[in-house]
Amino acid sequence: MVEHNIIKKPEHAELEKSKSHIVVEIIDYMPNSVVIKTIIKKSTGNISVMSFDSGEGLTERITPFDTFAQVIEGQAEIVIDKTSHLLYTGQAIIIPAHSPSCIKANGRFKMISTVIKSGYE
């Protein structure tokens, strides 16, 4: 798995408030890329929607906060502490703080990532 491109959409382009959205349509796939769009960014956490092209992913990392990852289209392989978890549309998992994890795209998929920072001060 090679991270070719990680594309972050501009932060000023957050979703319009008080308007309904079709979450899976918020972001598109881009060839050989992982695309990340921030939905909400606050000092206490953030919510992002991500699209992964087939064969792409995020390399192993350790974060200081729990991360709630929910697949909204396709299937994802999320590896936590060297244990692989295959998630399908509608499924979610909590990646514990301080645990090594990576995300692999065996096929195209989209997910929502929610990080809550409060409680870890």
Image: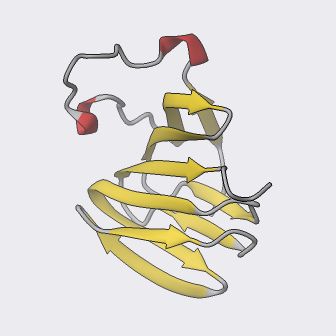
Question: Where residue 5 sits: x, y (%)?
Answer: 63, 38
The quadrant of the picture occupied by the C terminus is bottom right
Quarter of the image for residue 8 reads: top right
Whether 19 is drawn above or below 101: the answer is: above
User: Which residue shows up at 25% across the image and 39% down it?
Assistant: 24
Whether 112 is drawn above or below 71: the answer is: above
User: Which residue shows up at 76% across the image and 65% down it?
Assistant: 62
User: Which residue shows up at 38% across the image and 78% down it?
Assistant: 86
Question: Where residue 98 sits: x, y (%)?
Answer: 75, 71
Whether 4 is drawn above or below 86: the answer is: above
Q: Return the residue found at the far right.
A: 121
Nearer-the-camera pick, 16 or 33: 16
Nearer-the-camera pick, 104 or 111: 111
Which color scheme is applied? secondary structure
Q: Return the residue found at the far bottom.
A: 83
Seen in the image, is 30 located left or right of residue 45? left
Whether 71 is drawn above or below 46: the answer is: below
Quarter of the image for residue 61 reads: bottom right
Question: Where residue 1 sits: x, y (%)?
Answer: 62, 64
User: Which residue shows up at 49% across the image and 29% down it?
Assistant: 40
Nearer-the-camera pick, 77 or 20: 20
Seen in the image, is 93 located left or right of residue 103? left
How many numbered discs? Answer: 0
